[in-house]
Image (tube, rainbow, N blue to C red):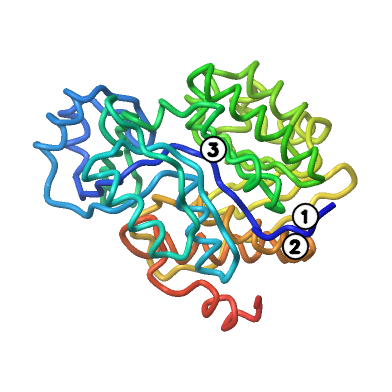
Amino acid sequence: MAAPIIDVVGIGNAIVDVLAQADDAFIRKEQLAKGTMALIDEARAQTLYGRMSAGLEASGGSAANTIAGIASLGGKAAYIGKVADDALGKVFARDLRATGVHYETAPLTGGPSTARCLILVTPDAQRTMNTFLGASVEFQPGDIDRDLVASAQVTYLEGYLFDRPSAKEAFRQAGAIAHQAGRKVSLTLSDPFCVDRHRADFRDLIRGHVDILFANEAEIGSLYETKDFEAAVAAVRGECAIAVLTRSEQGAIVVTAKDRVAVPAAPVAKVIDTTGAGDLFAAGFLYGFTRGRDMAYCARLGALCAAEIIAHFGARPETKLSELAAKAGLA
């Protein structure tokens, strides 16, 4: 087996994020489900964008945020995801490459425009996401860079991308390539409503292709159709080697066949915006994992990265995570 040249390669929806503040009255007026992600069409995206207050526009997408976090920690990271050959697509590619991430997926021509996610952040730091998937859902198995996947210690799959049959096929293909090369495969469930739509397929993917699963309490409950967290923990233990389950202010637990490791949430002076918290937790955990650290270390680093991201507006680190880790004794 050749030595890996990439720590983690992420595969997900390539999206430009538009973040703006909003109050609960605006959420109700627009008939949005607070704290969740909804898929919208291009017409609705244009209407909602026009009603939002001025905000921040930057490259985003769940897996892309994770991969940018790994680069900020000092890891070698790469990303595979589809944008259109348009202005927003160029913004996405430029922003991601500027973080130090390798990104070379060929853009889509002659199809829908680049995806964008309209994120409304309320005063309680909850984020309500409205996503036009655009070019990102045109992702095909042919977009998988076989050599890149085979060269990465971990291939990280984003559940949000799992909607179309072509993406499901691409995920299974990427998992097979990674395992044939002796590498690991990781999946984030992304959103409980995403799990609701594809529960059987997710469970099949987890059993057959996933070594490291990331989920929050709502997502893992949705996967196993239970509101009993301990029942969900027991169910997932038999389906993948490592399950990383985050519980907001209650911290996280890491479940393996024999062990259960609990780690508290890292302290935060004030929670400003929870966008990207799970993404950056995964970044810290996977960075530690690719360096052979134990589960407790990986989870503590994940909690530290999540704490950095929720202390400010936006889903990308404002502080170099490698410096933050060093100060916390987690370098």
- Residue at horizontal 42 percent and vertical 74 percent from the top: 319
Disc 1 target residue? 261
Q: Earlier in the sequence, mark 3 or mark 2?
A: 3
Disc 3 target residue? 158
Q: Earlier in the sequence, mark 3 or mark 1?
A: 3
- Residue at horizontal 69 percent and vertical 64 percent from the top: 288
How crowded is the residue under tag 3: few (<14 C-alpha within 10 Å), some, or many (20+)? many
Disc 2 target residue? 296
What is the C-alpha distance between the residues marked 3 and 1?
A: 24 Å
Q: Is residue 74 above or below residue 128?
A: below
Which amino acid lies under the numbered mark 3 shown in the image of this protein? Glu
Q: Is residue 280 above or below residue 225?
A: below
Q: What x and y, as percent, mark residue 272? A: 33, 59
- Residue at horizontal 65 percent and vertical 45 percent from the top: 147
Q: Which mark is residue 83?
A: none
Which amino acid lies under the numbered mark 2 shown in the image of this protein? Ala
Q: Nearer the viewer, residue 237 or 291?
A: 291
Dot 3 falls on a residue whose secondary structure is strand
